[in-house]
Amino acid sequence: MAEKLNRRGVLKLLSLLSLAQLRVPFVHAADSFVAEGDSPNVIILLFDTLSAYHVSFHGYHRNTMPNLARLTQRATVYHQHYSTGNYTTPSTASLLTGTYPWTHRALSHQATPLARFVKRNLFRGFAQAGYTRMGFSHNFLANILLNFFESDLDHYVLPSEVTLADFNFSDNIFQRDLGLASQAERVYLDKPGKVSNSLFFAPLLSSYQSRVRFELFKEMAREYPFGIPGRNDMLYPLDDTVDWFLQQIPGLREPFLAYMHFMPPHDPYRPSLDFAGIFKDGWEPARKPEHHFSEGYSQKRMNRERRMYDEFIADVDAEFGRIHLFLEERGYMENTWLVFTSDHGELFERGIWKHTTPVLYEPLLRVPLVIVKPGQRERIDVYEPTSSVDLLPTLLHVTGQEPMESVEGRILPLDSDDRANPMRPLFALEAKSSPKYQPLRKATLALIKGSHKLVHYIGYEKGFTDVTELYDIVEDPQELHDLASARTDLKDELLEELLTEKARADQPFMGT
Amino acid sequence: MFLDIPSWLVYMTSWELLGAIAYTLSFALFETLAAFLPLLILAVVLPQKWYGEWFLAAGSLLLLEAALLAMGLHVLILNDLPKRNAILGFGILALLTVFLVLRYPKVNRGLRMLADRLGVLTAIYIFFDGLGFVIVFARNFIGA
């Protein structure tokens, strides 16, 4: 790793010096907290698009997350943790409402949950116990959700306050109506690869963005050889955001709930210099057959992108290490529940790259979940399947609060004696083309139960509708052997359960 | 925008759909006003005697040419091509436009007739844009 200290590095260190001034008062605050036995803090660190299949301590070939692996020695590790969807909107809404996407109905891009969830969410749950609640997301889809729950946030942080450059204007102007405004903004201005609807603003904006990007890249090219981490709408070097977060923590009135939704390692994968090229090891994963929904990416291309993704994860891990070190040194780990997770995974197989796809293979759904209890010393491993809908009831439970009735998740096992029901059905779905207020028409539905996973496609084009796949995810974690034809009895049983559950979820929307 | 409405129909309520259209119309109104602003400023700044009928004709034609330039810029940006020549070309075209309008009264008259006819369409367009702006205002200041 490079040891050189550049200008940004020096500035970063200087910025951290200001934190040192806060050390003494904070330690006193922490001491008094422990003595008085107040409610613990909760920090949720969500790194977008982080597949458990690429995490070293879950058995991945590359050592992508050494810092997180160190933490797991005194944490609860969930080895089969599932997201409820394969992209941000439905999966994050599930995490924040404790309900499945077919219940909260934030199904499509930029969608928000049904109106009733304005008052039934994670942040509302922490209101009564007097928590200070902070929410931030780099991801504009997650930001729309945070905006939806804004009345329950004491500190709703706009991306523009933290990011290096934020090219969205809706989040600064139309905060009361962000979901619709940003949707219209994108329709009007952003047409990546297509002619925009806006005649004059779009080329002006595009030229301005190019200039800003170019100037910033000139300044930071040594640090980010593949470009500054960011997407079309903003630039967000993770180290800057982490610095900002670490500066916020001492200022938060305790107890606090901090939800930090970081964009990396979401594509485009842009590891910093220290991690660029660290996995040039020539390793190639096992080839898998092309899927019906293959996008035609070659294995060579996907292997190259996978390597960059892994390097970006290593970068994320280093930043996580900095957060953990800070929390450790300042005594926060003694009075804080720390949650590390992701909203969904990423795919580099079967001709499909990234996660905008109808398929629900394991690398897309399985995400890491590591929870550290205040003062936890021992490691606990949970091998039973768990879901992101479980996080809300669990966090409310451990902080002495009652989850709302609408919650579909269960309290996660947290002690070595706790056991989850291994035969509990878990669900995940991809339904971005389905209507919000009508029964699901076009969707991919997944049921995970015991060692099996059933995937059912409905409403797709002729030749691929009502198709069902069945995998033994314990014996065949790479999902290479579809058992749907060989195990028709099991397939029919699971399919009936899945469709019954879908019908229950569709019930309120029948006749609309 | 109209290409997006079919997809909006499936997951929005009527009020949300109206809101999404309203935002798009409001952005268009703002853009239109911004495009007209340079001409309005010129009209205010220039001496009264300069601001004659030729100004309306030349201004209308310049706006149409600017729209064509913007379309060209879209294509150049999409294909990552240099834009300097297109902008220089527009500058020359603008000078030529003013010259033609001043030199040939028929061109002047023809353009003013065109502007009169387009004015009717513009009034309808601005009415809907204004309506969109009212809806955006209501959603943000009265309640979504």
Image (tube, coloured by chain):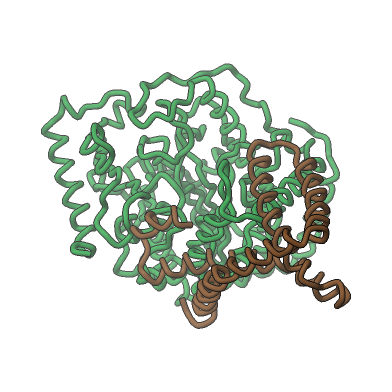
- What count of labels does the image hold? 0
Q: Quadrant of residue B60?
A: bottom right
Can residue B120 be seen at all in this image of the molecule? yes
Q: Nearer the viewer, residue A199 or A92?
A: A199
Residue A334: image location, x then y, percent: 57, 58
Q: Quadrant of residue B33?
A: bottom right
Q: Is residue A512 left or right of residue B15?
A: left
* Residue occupying the far bottom of the picture: B142
Q: Is residue B26 left or right of residue A509?
A: right
- Quarter of the picture containing the C terminus of chain A is bottom left
Residue A292: image location, x then y, percent: 33, 29
Which color was chain A given?
A: green
Q: Is residue A64 left or right of residue A100?
A: right
Residue B107: image location, x then y, percent: 73, 59
- Quarter of the picture containing the N terminus of chain A is top right
Q: Nearer the viewer, residue A436 or A478?
A: A436
* Residue occupying the far left of the picture: A489
Which color was chain B given?
A: brown
Q: Nearer the viewer, residue B80 or B142?
A: B80
Q: Nearer the viewer, residue B144 or A223?
A: B144
Can residue A30 be seen at all in this image of the molecule? no
In the displayed structure, A290 sits above or below A143; it is: above
Q: What residue sits 78% from the left and 67% below the top?
A: B55
In the displayed structure, B4 sits above or below B117; it is: above
In the displayed structure, A187 sits above or below A406; it is: above
Q: What residue sits 34% from the left and 61% below the top?
A: A104
Q: What residue sits 50% from the left and 79% below the top?
A: B138
Residue B126: image location, x then y, percent: 56, 72
